[in-house]
Amino acid sequence: MLNRINHIDSMELFIVKLPLVEPFETSFAIETHKEALLLKISSEGIDGWGECVASPDPYYSSETNETALHIIRAFLLPLIIKMKNFSLQEVLEEFERIRGHNMAKATVENALLDLLARKQNLPLYELIGGEKKRIMSGISIGIKKNPDELLESIKKALSKQYHRIKIKIRKGREIEPLTRVRENFPDIKLMVDANADYSISDIEILKQLDDYDLMMIEQPLEYDDLYFHSLVQKELQTPICLDESIENLNDVKTAINLGSCRIINIKQGRVGGILNAKVIQDYCRNNGIKVWSGGMLETGIGRAFNIHLQTLPGFLLPGDTSETSRYFQEDIVEPPVTLQTDGFIDIPEGDGIGVRVIPDRLTRFTAFSEKIEYK
Ligand code: OSB
Ligand code: MG
């Protein structure tokens, strides 16, 4: 940030595909693999890494890894090629001309932030003004075949000391699982995520969720809605948390003014990067809205960005930051994320995001790569 980049020597794009230890089912898809678009930017012997949070398909967001690849290649990287002795702020100003495509923009922003931090021998959290501290953990449990499997997963997560449990629900698959969970675990910190499966006409079902002492209901209604969420929030005791509906600071301001939610899930990739996420958490903190850091089943690169982000003061609730072994048998970075005996997570030590990409694992998991060199 404070520093400038003289010039970029090369950029490399990778699509990696990692098997998940177990399929992850949501109201919109079943995922068996994590496919991620990675970007390495090299400058004067130092590499910065970024990970795109998009998926191969447009079911969570309109962006996909292929659309991000296109936007990065055709529009974002060519802007940087032209720049000499530039700051990250200057890059982001150039990016403003491109509408939308936050996940693509965040990928480049993330790689440049990692690069800038490494150039200054600083951990990322220091570069962005965070505080050195441990991070709370949380787990997002997918829709299970039956309530017994769900109870088993919750039991396992509790034995690891996760600070809160989130379960995925979908219309018609909420009351029975929640009843069983509360019979077995009356006191745990619990929340649900509907991934936009309901609409305003389902308000009577949503009202029933007030009986389960939930920390929040995440994204009950349509992915692009703020108005109907405000009507539902007025009828519910349980806070609504928005995920899909929030793509920028304007959405946040509209949501707060309408009363569409009391909590916001910030996915830095969904809002265009770490610096936008920082502005949003600051705005929320000043307006009495708690935020937490969401996840997109990221590899160790994206997960490290989420961990550094949570050192900022607005992140008052545990996020979807789980340990590596819950997603992958083998990740592309070292060290893995692990939970301490009290469920907290340490910030990885070292410069930048603090994790290193292991070349042979990257090669093994890479399905596509492309290198762009500059003179
Ligand atoms: O809605 O938060 C979501 C994963 C993929 C897409 C959307 C979501 C999720 C998660 C998993 O809930 C969070 C994680 O553990 O990374
Ligand atoms: Mg969500």
Image (spheres, rainbow, N blue to C red):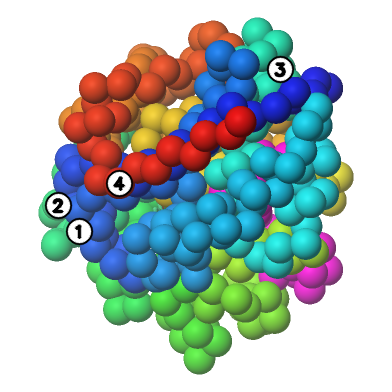
Q: Is 228 on the left-hand or right-hand side of 161?
A: right
Q: Earlier in the sequence, mark 1 or mark 4?
A: 1
Residue beneath disc 4: 368
Q: Is residue 268 visible?
A: no
Q: Secondary structure at mark 3?
A: helix
Mark before the other along the chain sequence, 1 or 3: 3
Q: Which residues are magenta?
A: 252-276
Q: Residues within 10 Å of mark 4 (few under 14, many from 20)?
A: few
Alpha-carbon distance for marks 4 and 2? 36 Å
Mark 2 lies on residue:
149
Q: Residue furthest right?
A: 286
Q: Position of residue 174 (x, y in %)?
A: 33, 69
Q: In front: 184, or 146?
A: 146
Q: Secondary structure at mark 4?
A: strand
* Measured Cα–Cα span from mark 2 to mark 3: 41 Å
Mark whose residue sits in front, 1 or 3: 3
Q: On the image, which quarter does residue 362 sit in? A: top left
Q: Which residue is mark 1?
A: 144
| CB within 8 Å, label 1 to label 3 | no
In this picture, residue 336 sits left or right of residue 351:
left
Cα distance in 3D space between marks 1 and 4: 32 Å
Q: Earlier in the sequence, mark 4 or mark 2?
A: 2
The residue located at (57%, 49%) in the rendering is 269
> Closer to the camera: disc 4 or disc 3?
4
Q: Are marks 2 and 3 in contact (CB under 8 Å)?
A: no
Return the residue at label 3.
126
Above or below for 305 versus 61? above
